[in-house]
Image (tube, rainbow, N blue to C red):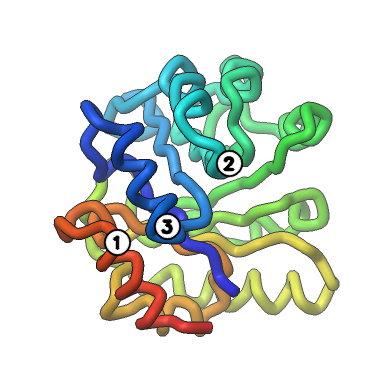
Amino acid sequence: MWKLAPSILSADFANLERDIAKIRDAGADYVHVDVMDGHFVPNLTIGAPVVKALRRATDMTLDVHLMIERPDRYLDDFLKAGSDIITMHIEAPGFSEELIDRIHAAGKRAGVSVKPGTPVEALYPLLDKLDLALVMSVEPGFGGQSYMPVADDKMRALRRVIDEQGLSCEVEVDGGVGQANIAYVRSCGADVIVAGSAVYGKGDVAAAVAGLRAAAPV
């Protein structure tokens, strides 16, 4: 069964505990936490102190996506804050394979992401060490964008390599996925679906989650 990771970027920041409880009760799998620094991407969101607060507020898996420069400087902060999965960008200044080892040494799961313009082959040498490979299907930085088809072949390629090598790495996709295209995105090989406005932008969170599940039942 595929996993649903609603992004709190589209939630009410004044009521994050409430909005996370809504997706938990609706049967979502992960809480996707978008961390943006205003440098690597043109937006500024939240940092490790908020992740620490979220950890106290929920026992759901915190899927923390670092869209930041110098993850090497800030990784320990997010590990200590209670992240369960930490995904870094391969394009980020300061990224190195050693950071994956640091995440695993802390008993957490590690992911690496590629932006739409980055060839997916950049992830291949890392797949045997990764728990998650994240394909961005929008330009990172803002929610509510339309899905970019460039992600299709990237997911298919990752799925093929992972399966051929018998690896346990999950394929995650982030950006522009909703009821209209989730079945197709799943068919491209995604195991984990990030959805922000498709969950929190619909008013009834439980109905939105149920609609996504119904649109891609397997």
Q: Which quadrant would residue 170 be assigned to in this image? A: bottom right
- Mark 1 touches mark 3? (CB < 8 Å): no
Using a 10 Å C-alpha cutoff, classify the residue at mark 1 as few (fewer than 14 neighbours), some (14 to 19) or many (20 or more).
some
- 58 relative position to 214: left or right: right
Residue 130: give x, y in percent of width and height: 74, 50
The residue that appears at 45% across and 58% down in the rendered structure is 28
Which residue is labeled 3 in the image?
194
Question: Please, which residue is most extreme toward the front here?
Answer: 25
Give percent across and percent down for residue 214.
37, 81
Residue 82 position within the rendered picture, expressed as x and y whole percent measured from the top left: 60, 26
- Reading the chain from its start, which is encountered first: label 2 or label 3? 2
Tell me which residue sits at (74%, 73%) in the image. Answer: 161
CA distance for labels 2 and 3: 13 Å
**Residue in the foreground of this view, choosing between 94 and 61:** 61
* Numbered disc in front, either 2 or 1: 1
Q: Quadrant of the N terminus?
A: bottom right
Residue at 50% over, 20% down: 52
Which residue does the numbered mark 2 point to in the structure image? 87
**C-alpha separation, residue under disc 2 versus residue under disc 1:** 27 Å
Above-or-below relation of 129 to 86: below
**What percent of the width, then of the height, locates residue 66?**
50, 34
Q: Count neighbours of disc 2 (C-alpha within 10 A) and say few if under 14, some if 14 to 19, many if 20 or more.
A: many
Q: Which residue is mark 1?
A: 206
Where on the picture, by quarter, is residue 94?
top right
Is residue 89 something that shows in the picture?
Answer: no
Q: Is residue 5 above or below residue 42?
A: below
Between label 1 and label 3, give the one nearer the viewer: 1
Give the mark nearer the N terminus: 2 vs 1.
2
| Separation of residues labelled 1 and 3 (CA atoms) | 16 Å
